[in-house]
């Protein structure tokens, strides 16, 4: 379980393919604090630490993860948003995030405002995921509030701190991102589908 509050942005050091899997080595200051089998969210994708040194660690993505996220397009040198799993008793500063990506979206517009930046994302509505105005959304692991909610798109407004301390600062029109929709909204949507 995560909160969507990014701890650090670190560099993807190495990508190694192994049959249908991908092993990713991350150069990060968090490495010295991690343990084998620990869960870490990488751009919103929950992955398990399988190898560890004082300066980097390795996680493995299986085919299911590769097919449903942006991870298959990652390259050495990419900036990755990282968050360790929350501890019981900690403050929940963002919202409840599972680290299970629902789908990929594409950045369709970036607009600078006075003191903030608006990012608009478009996604495939056929997967029945929804946003609501002022509801929660996770974009590349970052907990955000939805503005301008539409049927297949939404916008978020980013403060300068978030832009500087996440990989949002590298986004441009056409950038693909991982989305995790609000878990409560997903349950409500599923119940409505069942009740027809």
Image: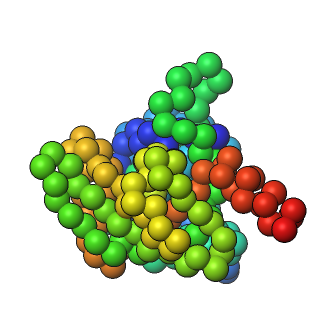
Please provide percent x and percent y for residue 145.
43, 47
Question: Viewer-proximal residue, 83 or 146?
Answer: 146
Q: Position of residue 68 (x, y in %)?
A: 61, 73
The figure's colour scheme reads: rainbow
Considering every residue shown, the one lying at the far front of the view is 196
Outermost residue, left direction?
114
The answer to whether residue 102 is seen in the rendering is: yes
Using residue 91 as the reference point, say whether residue 75 is left or right of it.
left
Residue at figure coordinates x 47%, y 52% from the top left: 133
Residue in view at x 62 percent, y 66 percent: 129
Q: Nearer the viewer, residue 20 or 128?
A: 128
Nearer to me, 26 or 70: 70
Q: Position of residue 53 (x, y in %)?
A: 49, 44
Q: Quadrant of residue 95?
A: top right
- From the image, which quarter does the C terminus lie in? bottom right
Judge whether residue 104 can be spotted in this image.
Answer: no
Identify the residue at horizontal 64%, vertical 79% (top origin): 126
Determine which quarter of the picture holds residue 161. top left
**Residue name at image x 48 percent, y 30 percent:** 93
Vertical position of residue 192 compared to residue 161: above or below: below
């Amino acid at each position: 379980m995560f909160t969507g509050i990014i701890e650090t942005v670190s560099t993807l050091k190495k990508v190694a393919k192994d049959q249908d899997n991908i092993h990713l080595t991350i150069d990060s200051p968090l490495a010295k604090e991690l343990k084998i089998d620990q869960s870490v969210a990488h751009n919103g994708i929950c992955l398990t630490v399988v190898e560890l040194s004082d300066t980097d660690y390795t996680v493995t993505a299986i085919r299911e993860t590769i097919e449903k996220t942006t991870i298959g397009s990652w390259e050495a040198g990419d900036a990755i948003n990282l968050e360790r799993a929350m501890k019981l008793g900690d403050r929940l500063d963002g919202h409840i995030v599972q680290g299970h990506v629902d789908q990929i979206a594409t950045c369709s517009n970036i607009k600078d405002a006075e003191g903030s930046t608006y990012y608009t994302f478009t996604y495939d509505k056929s997967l029945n995921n929804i946003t609501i105005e002022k509801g929660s959304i996770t974009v590349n692991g970052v907990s955000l509030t939805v503005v301008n909610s539409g049927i297949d798109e939404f916008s978020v407004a980013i403060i300068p701190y978030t832009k500087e301390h996440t990989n949002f600062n590298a986004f441009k029109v056409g950038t693909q991102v991982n989305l995790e929709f609000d878990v409560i909204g997903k349950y409500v949507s599923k119940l409505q589908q069942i009740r027809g």
